[in-house]
Amino acid sequence: MAAIRHLASPPLLRALLPVSNAPLRPVLGIPVLRHIHQNSLFPSITLPIPVAAIAGLSSIFNDIWESILRAVPKKKTSHMKKRQRQMASGKHLKDVTELNKCSGCGRVKRAHILCPYCVQAIKHWFKEGSSEATTTGAEKSKQYLTVHTLENAHPTDVFSIAPTKIQLLSASGSSTIRIHSTTEPDFPQIQTLDGVHKLGCHHIVTSSEGKRAASAGFGGEVKFWACGEDGQWTKEDIELDVPPRAGELWAVALSGDGRYLASSSYDGKVSMWDLAAGDGTATRIRHYETKGSFGTCVDISTDAALLASGHQNGSLHIFNNTTSRLLHSLPGLLSPIRAIRFSPLTTLLAAGGDSRIIGLYDVRSGEQVAQLLGHQAWIMSLDWSDTGEWLLSGAWDGKAKVWRTETRECVATQGFDGGTVWAGRWLPRVTGMPERFTVAGQGVGLGFEGGEWVGTSSYLKC
């Protein structure tokens, strides 16, 4: 006890705690300290607390209290205030200028970012594929029958074919055009037009009535043919008022009645000709300028009211022949477009090319309504059936596909050993015979396919 009193003596405290030299006072006014003092085991000990220490505690309590006040949630910043701060000078949101066009669908997207439209289309494609895999065996079963194949139909590759109600005209890299009958099971050759195009023929088309045909050669010349009552074809004395120069007239198409001819050229110009002038010279009645890219394909509606053209730079245009104005400049596929085709009722336009996607466009609004995915190579040809229910496509890898227009699904895929499918056409429906189509391409043969549809998704190949 004496030692404790000694330690608590003022001289020792002053030596150990210099701050205790300040005026001391027992802070017994605080209830807690008073209680400790009254019940202390060492009543002789006095708790000397310097005033400076009390001041230090006060500052600590002030800091803690201020932090508590700051932690109190404040009023939420309004949306208007946030927008004012965002749109302030130098702080506003900057416009996104790093944009480009998707090489797949041709729509605008952000650079270095996947196209959201293509991603959505691929997801839909996988989803539909998985749903098809779960269908019943009866719906997925296909029965194939072989009807006929013409070997050595031409000495070189067959580039174009054109059907009539009872015949099929074919043109190749040779100078001849050959006509086959489609009313007999072996599709015999019934006529040959020799020496038509010296450098070969790359396009041949017929009217819906089957009375007139037009062929375009690699030399730039276009020749017209008329079918007589006996089914024989003879040359018509119709000339176009353009010099026969390579590329000057490339793709050609005839209207339903055969009176009007549409053509494209190497410099992107698209023209429409009236073949009923009567003096032996076709009159150019429409002339449309584009951006100068090669006009790879062209088509004209059945009533000749609309004209469509596809170009090497991926652009796609629809012209109104009544007003002589551009109706739609459709979002193309950025890659060269090699085939376009109006539907029989001119409600849809199908386009395909190097992008390996078939785009379906609404003719009235100009909007793309569907994308048909499935080809693994360039799409070289397109053709609608007479009813518009089916769409036929041929590709560079020798695959031909049949698409259902209503469901946008591929219902049949046919592979051909000949190589590239340059052309594919539906044959007119004949009473008592199944639906048929024919394909031609690399090699010298013609393949005739056809069949009946069983259930909802079965196809018979012939």
Image (cartoon, rainbow, N blue to C red):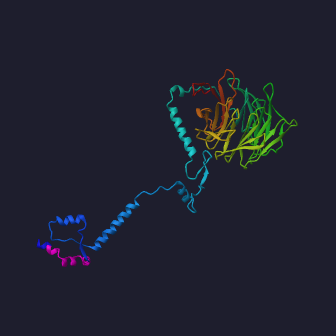
- Residue 249 location, x and y as percent? 77, 43
Q: Is residue 179 above or below residue 323?
A: above
In the image shown, does 415 or 393 lie closer to the viewer?
393
Q: Is residue 105 above or below residue 73?
A: above
Q: Quadrant of residue 316?
A: top right
- Position of the C terminus, as image quadrant, is top right
In the image shown, does 42 or 263 lie closer to the viewer?
42
Q: Residue furthest top?
A: 432
Q: Quadrant of residue 401?
A: top right
Name the residue at 55% across, 51% down.
113
Task: Write the start and end of the magenta stretch as one range.
Answer: 5-22
Q: Quadrant of residue 447?
A: top right
The kind of secondary structure the magenta stretch mainly shows is helix
Name the residue at 20% across, 65% down.
36
99 with respect to 154 (left or right): left
10 with respect to 451 (left or right): left
Q: Is residue 439 above or below residue 13?
A: above
- Residue 396 location, x and y as percent? 62, 40
Q: Residue furthest left?
A: 2
